[in-house]
Image (cartoon, rainbow, N blue to C red):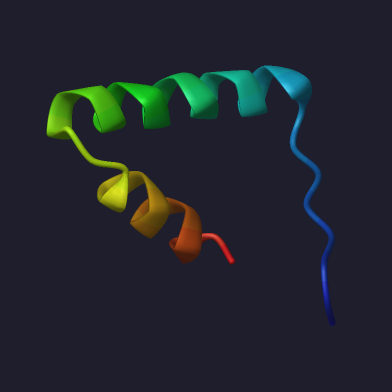
């Protein structure tokens, strides 16, 4: 049985801040792209 998960606007804003932090810290968006791929 498939389930649909809907994220709130607050969650997406916080996720974007987290990913931006990792991008700036690591100097690359490779880790952020990896994290996003895990949720697919």
Q: Residue at x 28, y 32 (%)?
A: 23
Quarter of the image with the N terminus is bottom right
User: Residue 22 versus residue 9: which sits nearer the camera?
Assistant: 22
Q: Along the line of sight, which residue is nearer the eye, 7 or 27?
A: 27
Compared with residue 2, is residue 18 higher up or lower down, i.e. above or below?
A: above
Q: Position of residue 11 (x, y in %)?
A: 63, 25
Q: Nearer the viewer, residue 26 or 6?
A: 26
Establish if 14 lies above or below 33. above
Residue 36, above or below 23 = below
Left or right of 4, for residue 39: left
Q: Quadrant of residue 32?
A: top left
Q: What's the residue at 77%, 27% (across, down)?
A: 8
What residue is shown at x 61% (from left), y 19% (from top)? 13
Q: List the single residue furthest toward the front.
A: 27
Which residue is pictured at 45% across the width and 19% down the height?
17
Q: Position of residue 22 (x, y in %)?
A: 26, 31
- In the rendered view, does 4 fall on the left or right side of 30? right
Counting from the top left corner in percent of width and height, residue 16 is at: 52, 26
Q: Specify the farthest residue to the left.
A: 26
Q: Position of residue 10 (x, y in %)?
A: 68, 17
């Amino acid at each position: 049985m498939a389930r649909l998960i809907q994220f709130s606007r607050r969650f997406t804003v916080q996720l974007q801040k987290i990913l931006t932090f990792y991008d700036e810290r690591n100097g690359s968006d490779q880790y952020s792209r990896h994290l996003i791929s895990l949720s697919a």
